[in-house]
Image (spheres, rainbow, N blue to C red):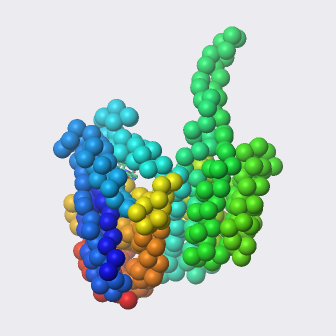
Amino acid sequence: MKTLRFTTLPGDGIGPEVMKVALDVLDALGPKHDFQVEATSHDVGGIGIDNHGKALPDSTLSACEQADAILFGSVGGPKWENLPPKEQPERAALLPLRKAFELFANLRPGNLYPELADLSPLRPQTVANGIDVLCVRELTGGVYFGQPKRTETLENGEEEAIDTMVYRSGEIERITEIAVRAASLRGGKICSVDKANVLETSVLWRRIVTECVERLDGSIELSHMYVDNAAMQLVRDPNQFDVLVTENMFGDILSDELAVICGSLGMLASASLGARENSLSLPFGLYEPAGGTAPDIAGQGLANPCAQVLSAALMLRYSFGLEEAAAAIEQAVKDTIKAGFRTGDLAQGGDSVGTAEMGRAIMDRLD
Ligand code: NAD
């Protein structure tokens, strides 16, 4: 039996409530897929500040270093929002974690089940069959980090600000490898998004992606699209895409566009994969729901646990290589929605269930 060693960082607000459900689901699934969970839980975010004086306590970081993956909840809330920006739970916990584990690939599945099509702002006929797209965003390069980056006053008194967009071939190759791996587990199609008609970095991006896909897997169907067109195509016909791969800033924008067309934050999982391999020679990763700590409903047992449960499925897929177990969780969540279970965020004024009942409904449908 395989032992899955990972760290859970439940965090603040609804984090611990939905994390409990995700762990229950993994425990219930383990015997059916020949694995057992060996997870340790540590403080992060606001509770890290309260208990250890730091959003990412040293003990938490070293526990993560011993693990094969991190299952993250969410951090922050009203109690800590008056702290200086650098000490805010989200920034002071997630940025150092991204840095420590060189998390360069952000995977955001955009999943909308047909039963929840009403939640999407897109036209009913566009989303009648749901949405299933994966956005792979480069997370550590590009214009957000390139140097020089400064604001200065010129001799004529005008102010000038400079950001620099930089990409190296190695950075493009490693994100393409992740996209290829992801596409081979899905529909086998990649659309690489760039602005190669204007940007030098995009010209390099397009060439390296093309060479890399050809080298890694000739069966992948690769296309290229300018980012302005991709933004339009996502709302016009999202299902023309299988896997989107793109650089940091374009991915920041497109992945949020994908999230909003999918309707509810409570359903959206994400994965950030690192340069480093874990003890199984698979990517070390941090897996978390797309939403935050939802202070408006925290502590009331009302949160939707699906995003956290689906994040655990991504962890099984990418950091533990357990594709069938990951798919079993995804199918159970889908079947739970199909059976009519809705937490408040999905119910649109109709009947709703709480976090625990939603969790039980998912567990009842595992395999
Ligand atoms: P939020 O995502 O917490 O909440 C936005 C809305 O979505 C709220 O109405 C909330 O109730 C709802 N929602 C979110 N997740 C839900 C779920 N699982 N089930 C049901 N409803 C859900 O965003 P916000 O209000 O802007 O931020 C609240 C706090 O969370 C802030 O302190 C912010 O900094 C933090 N935050 C943390 C992360 C993170 O840890 N990665 C991400 C975003 C926001």
Image: 86 above or below 346: above
Q: Which residue: 38% across, 34% down?
A: 86
Percent of width and height locating residue 135: 58, 63
Residue 26 sits in quarter: bottom left
Q: Which residue: 46% across, 73% down?
A: 321
For the residue pair 339 and 328, the one nearer the viewer reads as: 328
Q: Is residue 146 visible?
A: yes
Quadrant containing the N terminus is bottom left
Image: 81 above or below 265: above
Quadrant containing the C terminus is bottom left
Q: Which residue: 59% across, 45% down?
A: 141
In this image, 261 relative to 45: left or right?
right
Q: How many numbered marks does the figure carry?
A: 0
Percent of width and height locating residue 208: 73, 55
Residue 335 sits in quarter: bottom left
For the residue pair 325 and 16, the one nearer the viewer reads as: 325
Q: Is residue 298 visible?
A: no
Q: Which residue: 70% across, 11% down?
A: 156
Percent of width and height locating residue 62: 30, 49
